[in-house]
Amino acid sequence: MKKIAFHILKGGVGKTTISGNIGAYLASKGKTVVIDADLQGNLSSWLFKGKELEFTLVDYLVGRCSLEAVIQPISDNFYLLPTASGDNELKQWAETQLSNDPFAFIALSDALTKANFLYAIFDLSPSISLLERSIIGACNEVVIPLEAEMFSLDGLESFIENLTDIEKKYRTNIKHDILVCNKLNRSLGRQTAIYQQIQTLSNHGYEIYTIPQDARLAECPLYHETIFETQHRQRSEKKLKPHEELKSIPQIKALGDVLCR
Ligand SMILES: Nc1ncnc2c1ncn2[C@@H]1O[C@H](COP(=O)(O)OP(=O)(O)OP(=O)(O)O)[C@@H](O)[C@H]1O
Ligand SMILES: [Mg+2]
C-alpha cells in the first residue's frame, strides 16, 4: 500500500482539497482510503454525506472500535477514515498517549494493507506536532502544496528540516520531491512572477505540478462531492458538453497518475 501525506507548514494552501480529490482519482485505480488526521475535520465534513459518525479515527487509535467500524464508504473503491470537527479527544490522545505509542500510524497502515487498500492519503493540519510527525514517519511520500503567493516558500525550508529529523527518528526515507502549485491564476502578474520562482526549484530536484484556481473546486465541500462528481452532475444538468472537462481535472489526473506510478 502506498501511503502519501499532503503537508506543509502553511495553512489554506489546499491540502484538504487536493487530498480529497486525488483520493477520489486514485480510487479509480485501486482501493483507496483518505484519512482525516486534521483536528479541524474538514475532509470529513466535506466527504461524509451520512448522518452522525458513530466512530472516528481516535476511537480506532484507542482501541474502542475495529477498522471496519470506523471506515466509511464514500463511493466505489473510495473510503474515508473520519475525524470529528474540532476533535478534542484526538488532540488529547496525541498530546498525552502518542509518545508512548510512536508507531501507532505504522500499525494503522499495516491494518489498512491487510484490508487490501492500495492507497492511503493522509490530510494533515499545517503544524508539525508529534501527531503530524508520527504520520509522516509512517508514509512513503509527502507531497508539498504551495500557492504562487508572497511568502509561499517560507514554510518549505523549515518543513524540509523537520522531515530530515523525522526520517532519522523513524529510520526511513520519505520521498518528497513533488511540489504542487495550487490555485494558480496565470492572469495575475504577481502569481506568474512567483510561479517562475517556484519553477526554479526544479533545478533542485523537485517535480512541479500545477492545479489552477477553479471555483468548482472551492464549491466541492458545499455539495459534499469531489470534482469528478461535480463534473458528472454538471454534465447531466447539461452545463457541460458530454466530453468537456472542468479545468482542474486534467491536472488532478496528471498528479494522481504520477503518485500511483
Ligand atoms: N485550486 C483551487 N481553486 C480554488 N479554490 C481552491 C483551490 N484549492 C483550494 N481552494 C480553496 O482554498 C481554501 C483552502 O483550501 P483547503 O481547505 O483545501 O486548504 P488547507 O491547506 O487544507 O487548509 P488548512 O491549512 O486550514 O487545513 C478553501 O476555501 C478551498 O475551497
Ligand atoms: Mg485542511
Image (cartoon, rainbow, N blue to C red):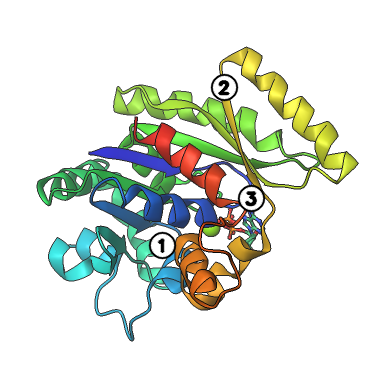
Depth check, mark 2 against mark 1: the one in front is 2
Q: Is mark 2 within 8 Å of ligand 1?
A: no
Q: Residue at x 44, y 57 (%)?
A: 20
Residue 34: x and y, percent? 35, 55
The alpha-carbon separation of the residues under discs 3 and 1 comes to 22 Å
Amino acid, disc 1: Lys
Q: Residues within 10 Å of mark 2 (few under 14, many from 20)?
A: some
Question: Which residue is nearer to you in this view: 185 or 35?
Answer: 185
Q: Is mark 3 within 8 Å of ligand 1?
A: yes
Residue with the mark numbered 2: 206
Taking 66 as reference, is 138 left or right?
A: right
**Who comes first in sequence, dot 2 or dot 1?**
1
Please tell me whether residue 149 is drawn above or below residue 229 in the rendered image.
Answer: above
Q: Secondary structure beneath disc 3?
A: loop
Gap in Å between the C-alphas at discs 2 and 1? 33 Å
- Decide: is 31 above or below 159: below
Check the image and report above or below for 156 versus 65.
Answer: above
Could one spot residue 65 in this view of the protein?
Answer: no
Residue to which mark 3 is pinned:
13
Q: Are marks 3 and 2 in contact (CB under 8 Å)?
A: no
The residue sitting at 54% across, 72% down in the picture is 234
Residue under circle 1? 91
